Structures are given as structure tokens and as C-alpha cells.
Amino acid sequence: MKSRQWLSLIACGALALGTAACGSSSSSSSSSSGAGGTKSSSGGGGGGTVNGAGSTLAAPVYQTWGSNLSSQGVTLNYAAVGSGAGIQQWTSGTVDFGATDPALKPAEIAAASAKGTPVLIPTVLGGITVSYNLSTVKTGLKLDGATIANIYLGKIKTWNDPAITALNAGTKLPPTPITVVHRSDSSGTTQGFTTFLSGYSPTWKSTVGANKSVKWPTGTGAQGNPGVAGAVKQTPGSIGYVEQAYALKNGFTYADVKNKAGNFVAPTLASTSAAASGAKVSPDLAYSAIDSPNSAAYPIASQTFIVVHQDLCKAGTSQAAAKALVSFLNYGLGQGQQVAQQISYAPLPAPLLAKAKAAVSKLTCNGAPA
């Protein structure tokens, strides 16, 4: 995919934060998927229009899949509103699917079950980079969980703090003040990042904790991965947690992070996929890639899911949209895995991919195969 087209899809996801979602093609004039939008309508060419909302981490890859399927009559409207808001919209029936980075919590499962059995479908993985804007350090910065936590607690205030210096022997670090940037919305990326920090900082775990939304001790909030990326790019001395695809497109420098095995690992497709290899997967396909024990794994890798109801039509999705949604999921778990790699998302390990495909094959529309 050309860079300009990819960036337009990013912008589409960012715009959807405050407005109706963008369609997957320029010719689309289908229903919106933002808060208060209408649900599914049939599309042309025997296809259908599908509305989804949620994860900003996954927005570029879902928009790309939707764009690639537009020639087959499938139109995707996706609102990148964050995992928390996406699950709320799906539960309320505003959209056909929700997109979330962490698996559903028991309370979310209970709320969604009013419309039928929720089904969790893993799609891809994304590395949550610790990106920074420091002109004098272009590469090679090393950080560990305890140090990152102390930066976000406001205890480490300058880039030449002894804790950072100790991890970076031979690197001349400036006395530049650190500006912390974090998410302001309910975010699966935030839950992944704060889960990692909780594992290495007892203070963080007891005072801030791990969740989609937390009470930040310091820093500036920004909406979505695009918002954090924009703030880091515009602020010298800043640090922010940004999904890898956004970091690469903005030309960010990001740290190698110490993993559970004691290795400093850069976020790459291989190290992000390694985080899911061997992960404990529950019967409903819930799993976490954060802080994997795999020695080759990047430790702040995030899984991401699409969430639907087992019987799509009984939950309120039209028959045309149900068929389009299944086409979208089958594409994403098929050719879409390779497409995802082209825009810096890691594919699912083969055993998990097989389970995800099996889950999609069991989706129905009024009791019949969807």
C-alpha cells in the first residue's frame, strides 16, 4: 500500500474520534459508526456495510483491510474511539462489532450477553513503543520497566537522570526536562502499558494500577494513538507510548525495553509475534502478550481482538451486514495477515490463528451459517 494512502487511513481513524467514522473507500456514503450513528445497511454489489468501533491501535490495519475489500462490495465504517468506547458502542447496539486490545472483563461479558453470546476473535498484534523526542539520542536508548514507571510517576524528571544513565553506559544524555505524554481516553493501549508498569513497580501497582483509564500522576493527555503521536512529535524532550505503526510513520525513535528474560529488545514484527507464541489462551480465546517470558519477545506487545455476537442477526445486525462482516473477518485472518505485516503489525502465531478462524466459522445469522 502506498504511504499516502496508508496515511489517509490513519487520518480517517483519527477523524472518527470526534465525528462519524470514515468509509473504507472514497465512494462510500454509508452509515456512520461513531457515537449515536446508525447501524448496518446493505451495500451495493451483493456486499454490505459493516460498522465497527474501538481500538486505535488496530485502526490502521482494519481500515486497510476494509479498503482492500471495497471492490468486493464490502464497505467498512470504523470509528477509532478507543477500546473502552468501542465496547460500549457494540454492547449498546450502535455498531456491528467492537474492537478491543484487552480481552473483555466479566462485567463487559455480562452486559454484552443481553444480546447473545459474545465471541472474542484475535486478529493481529502491535508493539507498544516507548517513543521519545530527543534530538541528541537518535538510537540505542535502553529502558526497563522500573525506570519507565518512575518517569510516568514523575520521579525521574530529566533525561540524564542517574537511573537512565545507568542503563545507557557510553551514551551522552542531555539534562533536557522530560515531558510525559499519555492517553486521555479509555484505551486498550493504556491497559497494556500500565499492566507492564505494574509488573515492575510496586508503587505504580498500588497507586495507579492497570486499566484502560487511570489517574495519571503527571503528564499531558492526548486522544488516541494519533493524539499521543502528534504530541510527542511536537514536543522536544517528550516521551509517550505509541503503537509501532504510528511511531514508524512519524519517524520516531523508540527505546529497546528490557524483557522478562533480562534482554533489551526492540519492537519488531518478529519480537512482537514472539510475545504471543506460547501465551496461555483461554477457551474463549482471551490471552495477553504483555511481558511474555519468551526470551526473544518485546515485552510491551499488545494483542487486539474483534468482538461480535455468536448469532449476528439476532443481536441486531442485518443479513447483508452479517455476511459482509464474516467476509471481513475471513479476509483479515487469511490474506490480511500478510497485509498487516506490510504496515508493521505482527501476525498471529499459527495455532492461535487456527482457533480464530474456527471461531469465525461458527458465527450465525438467525441460526444459519452467516
Image (spheres, grey):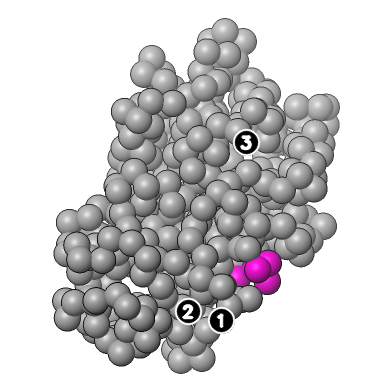
Where are the magenta residues, as a range? 291-295
Q: Earlier in the sequence, mark 1 or mark 3?
A: 1
Q: Label 2: few (<14), some or many (≥20) within 10 Å? A: many
The amino acid type of the residue labelled 3 equals: Gln
Real-space CA distance between mark 2 and mark 3, rounded to the nearest whole angstrom: 30 Å
The amino acid type of the residue labelled 1 equals: Gly
Residue at numbered disc 3: 337
Q: On the rendered structure, is 231 left or right of 352? A: left
Name the residue rendered at 41%, 73% in the picture: 142
Residue 222: image location, x then y, percent: 28, 60
Residue 71: image location, x then y, percent: 52, 13
Q: Label 3: few (<14), some or many (≥20) within 10 Å? A: many
Residue 178: image location, x then y, percent: 22, 76
The amino acid type of the residue labelled 2 equals: Gly
Residue 9 shows up from this direction: yes
Q: Quadrant of the C terminus?
A: top right
Q: Which element is circle 3 on?
A: helix
Residue at numbered disc 2: 145
Q: Are marks 1 and 2 in contact (CB under 8 Å)?
A: yes
Residue 293 within the magenta-colored segment of the rendering: yes
Name the residue rendered at 80%, 33% in the picture: 361
Name the residue rendered at 17%, 81% in the picture: 175
Residue 133 within the magenta-colored segment of the rendering: no
Residue at numbered disc 1: 199
Q: Which element is circle 2 on?
A: helix
